[in-house]
Image (cartoon, rainbow, N blue to C red):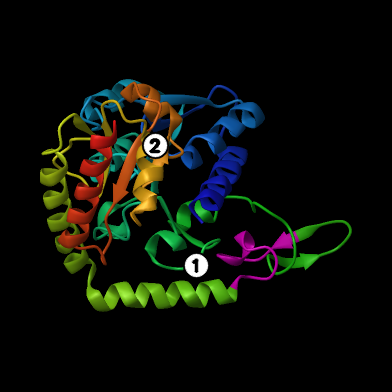
């Protein structure tokens, strides 16, 4: 999915375009999938990572971007929506700034495509990636969108069958797009299932999904803040339906386990975003995520469950 796609771009892009000392900019709230592949390239290609900071509210400090850009900046890779905070980044402004310096932008849309409208042409991104299982499809699948002018220049990521034009013991030539990036037998079962999931989203309408989820998010935020000693992390006014929180005196893991006994599913821990946790000054959080199928009544169940747990401590 997203992880494979970012690894593909980081490997192929750095092989083709980066020299030791060149730089890639990422934000302070990236998922590990958009951190670790670039760190691997620090060791392999000699690139250096630059980090775009965020505010205490969990918003990218856009005014810091141009300060980070230099003649050595080769790519900007940034999340569209934080998987921890729900913050929607000002992605079009980031891309506009980057393109003024002829710098391509990779957008991690794993947490956005299922929640809000995403238009790659309007956005004008150079690469965009997302995972199938985040949009109600199967695991192990994903999508990599890229502008042809960039994909044409990138070398293959992996070698094998189906991605070749000709093979001899002296030389291999490669197939055209997209096949040169698809070594081996494709996951046609997963592809068919993902297509079905996308049709499901299209039938409902992503605008309708966004409106529904924003209503659930607003209600959940209001109700959670009514709980004594509960703090929400990520307070941007422009966010998707994700709420990370902690209750003073209750460890996030204990909260998750106890909610699970009540049949309430939340995520606890660092959410594959340890640098962001350090920026927030916490070890981990409880994360409640709301999707197209969630209701206000289910929010009430969550809130009542938290209230019961608070009384135990």
Q: Check the picture and name the quadrant holding the C terminus.
A: top left
Q: Is residue 103 visible?
A: no
Closer to the camera, 39 or 148?
Answer: 39
Question: On the image, which quarter does residue 77 sit in?
Answer: top left
Q: Nearer the viewer, residue 301 or 142?
A: 301
Where residue 96 sits in the image (x, y, percent)? 26, 41
Query: Dot 1: within a 10 Å radius of its alpha carbon, few (fewer than 14), some, or many (20 or more) residues?
Result: some
Which residue bears the numbered disc 2? 254
Q: Which numbered marker is on residue 138?
A: 1
Does dot 1 land on a helix, a strand or a loop? loop
Identify the residue at image location x=40%, y=59%. Answer: 134
- Say which mark, if any, is on residue 191: none
Q: Is residue 238 left or right of residue 17?
A: left
Q: Main secondary structure of the magenta part?
A: loop
Q: Tell me where residue 22 appears, x and y as whole percent.
A: 52, 26
Q: Is residue 182 magenta?
A: yes
Q: Residue at horizontal 24%, vertical 63%?
A: 294
**Closer to the camera in the image, 67 or 166:** 67
State the residue in front, 186 or 275.
Answer: 275
Q: Nearer the viewer, mark 1 or mark 2?
A: 2
- Disc on the earlier residue, 1 or 2: 1
Which region is colored magenta? 173-187
Q: Residue at x 23, y 40 (%)?
A: 93
- For label 2, the SS is helix
Q: Is residue 29 above or below residue 66?
A: below
Q: What residue is at 17 percent from the left and 68 percent from the top?
A: 208
The furthest residue to the front: 312
Determine whether label 1 and label 2 are within 8 Å by CB: no
The local crowd at label 2, few if under 14, some if 14 to 19, many if 20 or more residues have their Cα within 10 Å, is few
307 left or right, relative to 5: left
Q: Is residue 167 left or right of residue 183?
A: right
């Amino acid at each position: 999915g997203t992880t494979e796609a970012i690894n593909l771009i980081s490997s192929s892009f750095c092989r083709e375009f980066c020299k030791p000392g060149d730089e890639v900019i990422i934000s302070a709230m990236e998922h590990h999938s958009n951190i670790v592949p670039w760190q691997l390239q620090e060791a392999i290609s000699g690139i250096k990572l630059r980090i775009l900071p965020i505010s205490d509210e969990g918003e990218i400090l856009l005014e810091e971007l141009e300060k980070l850009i230099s003649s050595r900046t080769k790519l900007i890779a940034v999340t569209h929506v934080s998987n921890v905070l729900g913050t929607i980044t000002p992605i079009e402004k980031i891309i506009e700034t980057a393109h003024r310096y002829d710098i391509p932008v990779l957008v991690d849309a794993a947490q956005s495509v299922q929640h809000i409208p995403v238009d790659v042409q309007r956005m004008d991104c150079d690469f965009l990636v997302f995972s199938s299982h985040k949009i109600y499809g199967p695991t192990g699948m994903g999508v990599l969108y890229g502008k042809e002018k960039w994909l044409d220049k990138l070398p293959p990521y992996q070698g094998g069958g189906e991605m070749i034009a000709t093979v001899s013991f002296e030389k291999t030539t490669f197939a055209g797009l997209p096949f040169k990036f698809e070594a081996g037998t494709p996951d046609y079962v997963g592809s068919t299932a993902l297509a079905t999931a996308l049709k499901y989203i299209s039938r409902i309408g992503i605008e309708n999904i966004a409106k529904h989820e924003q209503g659930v998010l607003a209600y959940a935020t209001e109700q959670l803040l009514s709980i004594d000693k509960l703090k929400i992390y990520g307070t941007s006014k422009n966010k998707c339906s994700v709420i990370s929180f902690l209750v003073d005196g209750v460890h996030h893991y204990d909260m998750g386990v106890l909610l699970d006994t009540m049949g309430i599913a939340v995520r606890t821990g660092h959410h594959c975003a340890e640098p962001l946790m350090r920026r927030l000054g916490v070890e981990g959080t409880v994360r409640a995520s709301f999707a197209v199928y969630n209701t206000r009544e289910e929010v009430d169940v969550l809130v009542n469950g938290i209230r019961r747990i608070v009384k135990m401590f």
